[in-house]
Amino acid sequence: MKRRVVLTACLLLPVAARAQDAMAPVMAALAARRTSRATFVEEKELQELDRPLTARGVLVWRAPDRLEKLTTEPFEERLLVEGDRLLLERPDRGIRQEIDFDTAPEVRPLVEAVRATHAGDAATLRRHFRVEFSGALPHWRLLLVPLSNRVLAAVQRITLEGEGGAIRLMEIHGRDGHSRMVVTPTP
Amino acid sequence: MTRLLGFLPLLLALAVLSAAFPLALREVTLRSDIADFLPQSRTPEAAFLLRELRDGAATRLLIAGVEGAPAAELAQVSRSMAETLRGSGLFAVVANGVPLLSDAEIDLLFAHRYALSPTTTPNAFTEAALRASFETQLDGLRSSAERIFRRFGFADPTGSFLGLVRGWSSASRVTTENGVWMAAGPRALILAETRAAGLDITAQQTAVDAFRHAFQTAGPPEGARLLVSGPGVFAAEAAAAVRADVKLVSTLSFVLVAAFLLWRYRSPMMLAVVAVPLALGTLAGLLVVDLTFGHVHGAALGFGMTMLGVSDDYPILLVTNRAPGEALRDTARRIWPTLRLAVAAAVAGLVPMLASGFPGLAQLGLFAATGLAVSALATRFLLPALLRAEGLPVRPLPERAAHLLLRLPSLRVPVLAGLVLVAVALALSGGPRLARDIAELSPVPEPVRMLDGELRAQIGAPDVRVLLSVEGPNAEAALRASEQAAAALLAAGVVTGVDHPARYLPSIETQRARLALLPDDATLAARVEAARTDLPFRATAFQPFLTGVAEARGLPPLTPGGLVEAPLLAARLSPLLREEGGRWRALLLPEGVGDPTALRAAAAGVPGLMLVDIKGETEALLDQGIGTALRWGAVGGVLVLLLLGAGRGVAGALRIALSLAGALLLTFAALHALGERITVFHLTAALLLAGVGMDYALFVSRTGREDIEDAARALGAVITCMITTLLTFGLLALCRTPVLHATGLTVCIGVASAFLLACTLAPRR
């Protein structure tokens, strides 16, 4: 009986399901890492600028939902996402800003692109993006296209690449610029 | 059966009257405007205050708190409630801390940023300033908040727009948590301004219901509570408190009075006998006041009914004074001179109220005077016609009590000495204390008022003790005047800040002046080019800035009429700027007032700037009100004395006046000893007391020539009157609602002392 259901399901599943199958172990590997720490180098290329802007720092992840981006160069800055809140601190300028996602709905997808991937949470990714997976566990690539038109107006797509349970590259392609963050896990 | 048939005319009259009441109430316009009970203002400050009390923005403010759950869940409820409330269309503003600039409003404000923003100064567009702005922009682009800088920074590198919006939010002093206003507790706060006037009790009640509905719709977590405060809640709570008290007391006192009258007159019909003149008097009072003033004030009706309580005594006096074998018609004729004198004196005492200048007090006086006169006439002419000649049987009072009372005059000297002692003691202790806080007049229960104070403090609704105001023939003039006044006060250093309408919408003149500061296109382009040297910006990067400045220069100034697309700006503006009878008024709320005297002095130096000390002004108004009432009361007292003198001779008049004055003295001394502060309710009750006290004194010593039986009957009648009054009003002393408690307590003490003094001071026989 049980067998027949599985059989029917297999027959009915579209071809894309195979990509799903490949994505599942990656998500599982990501979810398995409860904490991680990595250095990053971020390069932003903006339409209005004639050269890219570079920033360096550390990314700290702690399951289930806490992601911290500590910039050390060119200045110190702390971006913390936890729960439904985002906190931005610039000690040198005395800036401390708190944003609630419910009040800034267009921020949430951009945060979830990174955070839900860290968490291995495919459901949340699909809530905000059309998700295309390619590759396999040793080297994979996620292409995220925003579902919301409002977000789509600013960000056309986000790609994430990784190896196993570690994210190695994040790219954001916007209408008037693009940023690329290379991530190097530290033990 | 035949006995009942004998009462048929009376019952028919009562039926007609009770049918007439709903008809009359449909014709009569009832109003409930507290300002009617304040003296007509002579100063512009007082006039302004009255208008604020009547329909100021503060009277339309509802504040809600949600507590009893973790902050995150409260925030959820707060957001959901705000959405429901905004959708209801009942509110001009609903604020819960979430900034609510719509895209359309952002576009409008962004286009007008240079005219509206205080950051538009001559120095903001120099090459050096632009260089600094560009560096800030670059820094911002490097940061993680790069998106905000991208969105606004290239079109607005000087930060005019963000400066503008930031300037607004600094006006709010509430802390934000989870994206909504959250006070300690945690307690999420929501503030709403109703579209309906604060005095529209029904609309305010609807608004409160909308809050409760929104709370339920939000699916509050277990244990979450909604607290709402505002005029609507006040009205409802006050009505509920008064209603609950009145219901209990009136049921109780009805039962007691009915039982007493049944015992005394051996027939339930006595209630009907008392009701007929009272109903006629009330009806007449209502109609006359409505005809004279075009409306009847609810409070005048309430207080007036209290004073009409005097007329309860008339039928009792009539029925009880009937000698055996006398026809009721003859009794009426016999006691009429005394009754007439009593009513004439009472009316004379009330007439001065008509001239007092308070519309409310004048109505009260007219209502009571009309009612008393009509009740007395009904007792004299109508009741004997409605009742059988033998009236109602009267059960005699216990003989011993009557004799004791009739012997009271022998105690005259010690009693008078006692009165003098009390008077001296009262004078030494500083006399009765007057209540000066308007809150003490409020029938709103104490906990409700405390919650209101707490919510107001938490939401940072300024505890406005001092208000400043300027006027102008049009909005522009008012805005310009408020700009000048605010600048003058800040320059004088008497305030740390001023909230005023031009802070949100500058005058056209200021907007034009700011636009005039913008460099012309070529100059600005050259400065931008110079300022971006060595910075990684492309040549075209700041093109939106150049375009924006050029466009801003060509835009017509924003005016109060042009804010349809900017609801948030309009909401900030509306409490501070409004049209009043063809003129425009701007309100200025000072912040950080260190020295009120210095502020007053500085304000006096600004032409046209009016300073209103809300608390002081209210107290002055109340003082003036009570003072006026007392003055006219004294005039009434003199009139009464003259009338009594004419009716009873000087000695008789003095005797009656002494027993009345003594009763009032004892009452206020007792109130003082009990720690009560005298309010307008005590004074109204004192008028009732004076009215019944005069009746007692008049009837106990009608002519001084009656035989002992006649005197005993008269005494019996007065005792009956006293007991009925005590049972009717005295029980109110047990209520907690200030108005009812004050009335009851005053009447209780006063009526008893008036009666005893009337007996003591009656002529010796």
Image: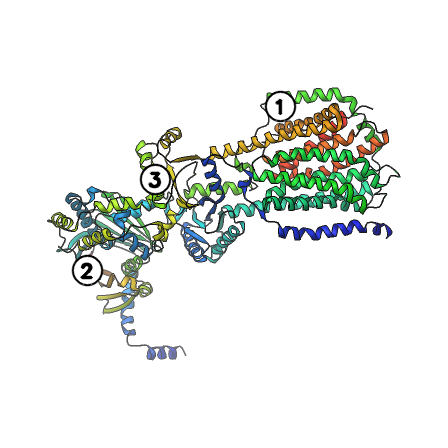
Q: Mark 1 sits on what residue? A: B426
Quadrant assignment for the C terminus of chain B: top right
**Which chain does the residue under circle 2 lie in?**
A
Q: Mark 2 sits on what residue? A: A178
Label 1 secondary element = helix
- Alpha-carbon distance for marks 1 and 3? 52 Å
Residue type (three-letter) at the residue carrying disc 1: Leu
Proximity of marks 1 and 3: CB atoms separated by less than 8 Å: no
Residue type (three-letter) at the residue carrying disc 3: Ala
Q: Nearer the viewer, residue A158 or A11?
A: A158
Viewer-side label of 1, 3: 3
Residue B154 can be seen in this image: no
Residue A10: where, in percent of width, then height? Answer: 33, 78
Q: Mark 3 sits on what residue? A: B481
Residue type (three-letter) at the residue carrying disc 2: His
Depicted B624 relative to depicted B294: above or below: above
- Alpha-carbon distance for marks 2 and 1? 87 Å
